[in-house]
Image (cartoon, grey):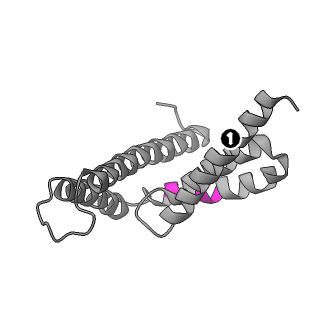
Amino acid sequence: MPAKDQVKRVTLSIVGGVVMLIGVALLVLPGPGLLLVLAGLLILASEFPALEKYVDPVRDRAMKAAEDSVSSPLRIAGSVLAGLGLLAAGVIWGIRLFPWLPFAGWSTGSSLIVSSVILFALLIWSYKKVEARRDQQKASRPGSTPR
């Protein structure tokens, strides 16, 4: 195997592993854990075909979790409040409003703000996906007219 291919394989392995580990951590922390686990798995599966068998089950669970997050107005409101809370916490940590906070500063604050942006982006994506599926189901019913 040429050196260029080896460097690519090692780089993708490291990136995939790091993304997957961050996803695993976010399974218990606020953030899109399952989607990052899926992203890391997809990166790793591009270099290690034996991992392909895990992609579909993880994808199914990640998509189900994304759809569940927008399944009711109450869940959407909860997700929006969580995102706003993360954003506010990021600003509070960043400007060191309370000096007694652990790890006060923009390194922690910016990571909280980025988490809120990711949460909002995934919430919008999930909502659009669920609405598109509903529209598709309505259009496929007998006697219905497409929009």
Is residue 31 left or right of 17 when viewed as pictured?
left
Q: Is residue 8 above or below residue 82?
A: above
What residue sits 50% from the left and 55% below the top?
66
User: Of 31 and 120, which appears nearest the observer?
Assistant: 31
User: Of 107 and 146, which appears nearest the observer?
Assistant: 107
User: The magenta stretch spans which residues?
Assistant: 60-67
Residue 39's spot in the image, x, y percent? 61, 47
Is residue 90 left or right of 119 when viewed as pictured?
left
Residue 66 is one of the magenta-drawn residues = yes
Q: Is residue 115 above or below residue 121?
A: below
Residue 104's spot in the image, x, y percent? 22, 61
* Label 1 packing within 10 angstroms: few (<14), some (14-19), many (20+): some
User: Of 54 and 29, which appears nearest the observer?
Assistant: 29
Q: Element at badge 1?
A: helix
Residue 26's spot in the image, x, y percent? 48, 62
Q: Main secondary structure of the magenta part?
A: helix
Is residue 21 left or right of 13 when viewed as pictured?
left
Q: Is residue 76 visible?
A: yes
Q: Is residue 63 visible?
A: no
* Residue holding disc 1: 12
Res. 124 image quadrant: top left
> Which amino acid, by three-letter code, is at mark 1?
Leu
Q: If the image is split into quadrants, where does the N terminus sit?
A: top right
In the rendered image, the residue lying farthest to the left is 97
Res. 21 image quadrant: bottom right
